[in-house]
């Protein structure tokens, strides 16, 4: 078998969204433009899972389906708004062997998707995670993880639609979670991943508060003894809409508790798995 045929890949790109119309109108055409350039990509599709938005997202999705019916699909979820279950619905609705999902707010751009896909092409049996916390990664448009980089990122975010408080929490909270769960994965709350669907346990996505599902997902991958490759990307600032990160320290703490529980539970699960 030639190297070229080894690089063949079929991938579905899932975008869970809620009131992100102005951002997905930019992101989807950029994804199509950049992904079309990838060599040896067997096929791809974009799936938007809308959590019953109130900003006329559905009208745009209907128009996009008319324009690109061969590569575009969408779902409208009417009940039980949930980030993790939106992702799961997108996975179930996908047609291809591999699936990528990411935020629809533009923080993960089309060129970063290409990096994940091309890395997956060369590493079929690995799981590829987009990481803000390794070389080549960064926070909200600013590369690097030192204190100077964090200060620069905070100034950058202050001028955007994102939350400075949310940025700072994301950086330091991720470090705290790594202390609780030292798996070797640097971006344990990434939410940006390429994975073969056969490695996915549906239960991981059910009845979760927000993004803590990703900690359980990484844990399940490690238990399966699958190799994980992190690929650095620069997390962009929000151009449109409002950040869904909690607006106060109290609400941020409340939102963070499920992540801490996930890290503690996952540590116990990994410890027991290593004893077997």
Image: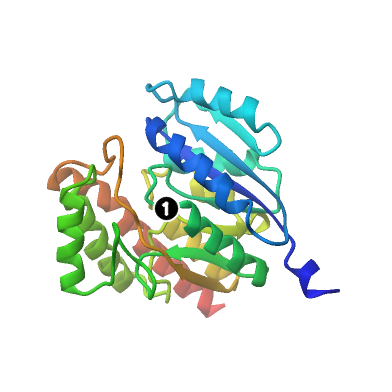
| Quadrant location, the N terminus | bottom right
Give the quadrant of residue 266.
bottom left
Give the colour scheme shown.
Answer: rainbow
The spot of residue 204 in percent (x, y) is: 51, 51
Q: What residue occupies the far right of the structure in this picture?
A: 1
Residue denoted by label 1:
108
The spot of residue 267 in percent (x, y) is: 40, 69
Q: Residue at x 49, y 52 (%)?
A: 110
Work out whether 101 lies above or below 17. Answer: below
Give the quadrant of residue 245.
top left
Q: Which residue is drawn at 77% across and 74% down?
A: 3
Is 8 in front, or is 94? 8
Q: Residues within 10 Å of mark 1 (few under 14, many from 20)?
A: many
Can residue 15 be spotted in the picture? no
- How many marks the image carries: the answer is 1
The spot of residue 162 in percent (x, y) is: 24, 46
Q: In this view, does 148 lie to the left or right of 232?
A: left
Can residue 109 be spotted in the picture? yes
Work out whether 105 lies above or below 267. Answer: above
The spot of residue 40 in percent (x, y) is: 73, 61
Is 87 in front, or is 4? 4
Helix, strand or loop at label 1? It is loop
Work out whether 54 lies above or below 276. Answer: above
| Quadrant location, the C terminus | bottom right
Is 259 in front, or is 228? 228
Q: Which residue is drawn at 68% across and 31% down?
A: 69
């Amino acid at each position: 078998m030639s190297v070229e045929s080894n690089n063949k890949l079929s991938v579905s790109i899932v975008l869970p969204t809620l009131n992100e119309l102005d951002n997905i109108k930019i992101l989807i055409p950029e994804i199509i433009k950049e992904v079309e350039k990838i060599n040896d990509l067997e096929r791809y599709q974009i799936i938007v899972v809308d959590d019953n938005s109130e900003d006329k997202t559905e009208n745009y999705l209907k128009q996009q389906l008319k324009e690109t019916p061969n590569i575009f699909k969408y779902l409208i979820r009417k009940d039980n708004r949930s980030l993790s279950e939106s992702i799961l619905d997108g996975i179930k609705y996908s047609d291809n062997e591999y699936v990528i999902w990411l935020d629809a707010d533009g923080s993960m751009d089309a060129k970063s998707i290409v990096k994940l896909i091309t890395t997956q092409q060369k590493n079929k049996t690995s799981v590829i995670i987009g990481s803000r916390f390794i070389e080549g990664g960064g926070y909200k448009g600013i590369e690097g993880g030192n204190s100077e980089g964090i200060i620069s990122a905070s100034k950058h975010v202050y001028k955007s639609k994102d939350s400075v408080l949310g940025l700072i929490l994301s950086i330091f909270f991720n470090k705290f979670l790594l202390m609780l769960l030292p798996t070797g994965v640097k971006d344990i709350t990434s939410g940006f991943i390429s994975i073969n669907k056969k490695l996915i346990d549906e239960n991981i996505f059910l009845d979760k508060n927000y993004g803590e599902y990703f900690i359980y997902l990484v844990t399940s991958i490690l238990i399966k003894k699958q190799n994980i490759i992190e690929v650095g990307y620069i997390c962009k600032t929000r151009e449109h809409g409002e950040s869904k990160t909690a607006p106060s320290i109290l609400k941020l703490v409340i939102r963070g508790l499920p992540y801490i529980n996930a890290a503690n539970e996952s540590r116990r699960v990994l410890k027991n798995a290593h004893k077997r």
